[in-house]
Image (cartoon, helix red, strand yellow):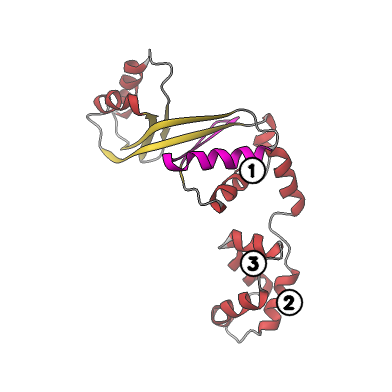
Amino acid sequence: MKPLRDRLQEYLEENPFLEEALHNGLLNLSAVARSWKDRLDRDQGESVSEASVIMALRRMEPTIPKSTMLKLKQFTSDFGDIIVRSDLADFTFNNSPTIASSQSEFLRRIKDQISWFYTFSKGVSETTIIISRDATTALLESFSNERMTQQTLDLASITIMLPQASINTMGLYYYIFRTLTLRGINICEVISTTNEFTLVVSKKDIEKSFEVIHQMRK
């Protein structure tokens, strides 16, 4: 049987937003203890009192210390330019022996279109390509021999230029994801280089996404 504190930490790790609300004093601890009562009794193999759960919750330390969260808030004020792109499309293909040749053919076709956006992400079994809608015809023709498994239109992206220290900043991406999620924004894709971070969202969410990121920078 695990110590009660360790068991409660497991429950909180399943829902980071619940943990944050706990450490911000926004939770009714009695209600939380009651809602977990049956599960705790089953997992611990004995009856656990509501009072002991409340006491354990009060004594728990945040997974991410408040000092770290403060540093993250200060760090986001150093974000560089924020670049928004609209009218994007997302295509995913199964990897194949010819996928690299198809990619080369696509790049050859669009080499003079310097304003078009494109990015490739090759995984173990599939490759995802995000492009400007204007490049769709060139892409589909270049990848005509490949097997497409997914296509998503009406997307937009927001790119954040990160400070040089971002690679050593613990929790930065979590902080960005958390803030967007709390505002009800679904992230469709993520594109990252060393000092750039791009979020791909539905076109309907791009204004709200920009507002959130802009507020973080303030």
Q: Nearer the N terminus, badge 2 or badge 1? A: 2
Q: Position of residue 92 (x, y in %)?
A: 34, 38
**Residue 197: image location, x then y, percent:** 56, 34
The quarter of the image holding the N terminus is bottom right
Task: Look at label 2 and name its amino acid.
Answer: Met
Q: Determine whether, in the image, residue 95 is placed left or right of residue 68.
A: left
Looking at the picture, does residue 131 appear above or below residue 51?
above
| Chain-order first, disc 3 or disc 1 | 3
State the CA–CA distance, disc 3 to disc 1. 22 Å
Q: Is residue 35 above or below residue 211?
A: below
Specify start and end residues of the magenta stretch as a single range: 189-218
Can you see residue 96?
Answer: yes
Q: Residue furthest bottom?
A: 47
CA–CA distance between discs 2 and 1?
31 Å
Q: Are marks 2 and 1 in contact (CB under 8 Å)?
A: no
* Residue 191 left/right relative to 136: right
Label 3 packing within 10 angstroms: few (<14), some (14-19), many (20+): some
**Element assignment for label 2:** helix
User: Label 1 belongs to which residue?
Assistant: 172
Q: Nearer the viewer, mark 3 or mark 1?
A: 1
Question: At x 43% / y 25%, what residue is drawn?
Answer: 117
Please name the residue that numbered disc 2 is placed on.
55
Residue 12 in the image: state x and y as whole percent: 61, 65
